[in-house]
Amino acid sequence: MKKYIPNILTLSRLLITPLLIYLGLTNHIITLIIVAILITLTDFLDGYLARKWQVTSAFGAKADMIADKFLAITLLILLIMKINLFFYILILEIIIAIVNIYIFIKSKYINSLLIGKIKTWCLFTTILAGFMSILFPWLKIFTTILALITIFIQLIALYKYVSYYFKSKKTPKEYTKEYQEFCQIIEPFINNKEYLKRKKYPHHINESVYEHTLRVAYDCFKIGRKLKLDYHSLTIAALLHDFYEKPWQYDTEKKPFLQMHAFTHAHNAVLNAQKNFGELITPKIANIMETHMFPVNKKIPRSKEAWLLTIVDKADSMDFILHPIILYHIFRKEEIKPKNKKTKKNVNKKKN
């Protein structure tokens, strides 16, 4: 059954569309908002379950893309009857959908970019704000601002999808070279025994420290390379930015507020990296690592590379911050259980 549950959740977004249309046309706005929120959460739940149970599939990826577009376009059509500005969001979303379909037909590949994830979150947030402003007119100014931001992000996403397609079509060898260069940069670190331990360190609810830092490092590498920054130092700093000594979830020691993990782990990561990799950690790499938690930590990023890591780390953490399961745990004030029980035992042994 695990193989089918994620796909059932995905298809539910298509099946619920007639109900949403009925609620919108009959002005049952409150019920519409509740149903829309619940059905939107399935977008994140299906992906989480598919990854957790290792049942991802090509069909699931295609169905997810179609269901997202169908749901968004349906809600936007209902909204433009009340708020004219959403007409432009609808047109852009249709264009993006057509471009994605065209790219898939040509390449047989569903392109997933970070900007696409940000756009989806922003789009559904703006849609829900639009329905809320129908009930509470004083929210119209806030909704207008969100709508303009969404339009801006849609334009960026559209540009990125088109440019990524043409670049991959014209210069496939260049992408191979790009990835090889990334692998060469991280090679001195990625197979280190201490770094490999991070596979067992839970970070966000659906990934380990190893997975998170590798993802952030590759995003920083691509963006830094494009912007012609010192992407070599940036990539290493991103790879090691959470190289703190032990999993923070199991630290039960009572500490002053400003000595808690969020405020100290960047500095701890630098010390641990210098201990394990010595001269490979240059002062610039150390500075990029130590300021990545700004504005939580006191140190302000001093370089473009440091600012980029700060932004990318937060963007790649959006799945955690807005994840429905983590929100449930926070609401219930429950402890997040570790994925790997052995990790907790090992940490306890070290404490003893």
Image (cartoon, rainbow, N blue to C red):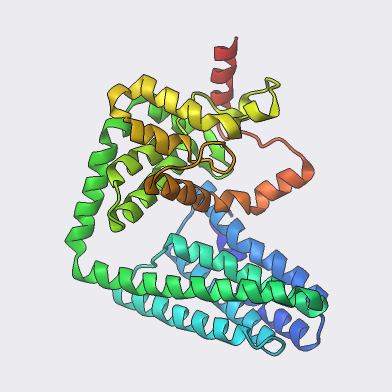
Q: From the top left corner, tell me how far across and down residue 168 is, in percent.
A: 25, 67
**Residue at figure coordinates x 45%, y 33% from the top left:** 199
Q: In which quarter of the image is the C terminus?
A: top right
Question: Count the marks: how many?
Answer: 0
Q: From the top left corner, tell me how far across and down residue 220 is, in percent.
A: 37, 49
**Residue at figure coordinates x 42%, y 62% from the top left:** 113
Q: Is residue 314 above or below residue 66?
A: above
Q: In this view, does 345 lie above or below 10?
A: above
Picture quadrant of residue 122: bottom right
Tell me if I can see residue 165 in this picture: yes
Q: Which residue of the protein is positioned furthest toward the top in this rendering?
A: 352
Front residue of 56 and 239: 239
**Residue at figure coordinates x 57%, y 37% from the top left:** 297
Q: Locate residue 181 relative to residue 38 in the image: left or right.
A: left
Tell me if I can see residue 5 in this picture: no
**Residue at figure coordinates x 23%, y 53% from the top left:** 178
Q: From the top left corner, tell me how far across and down residue 201 is, in percent.
A: 51, 31
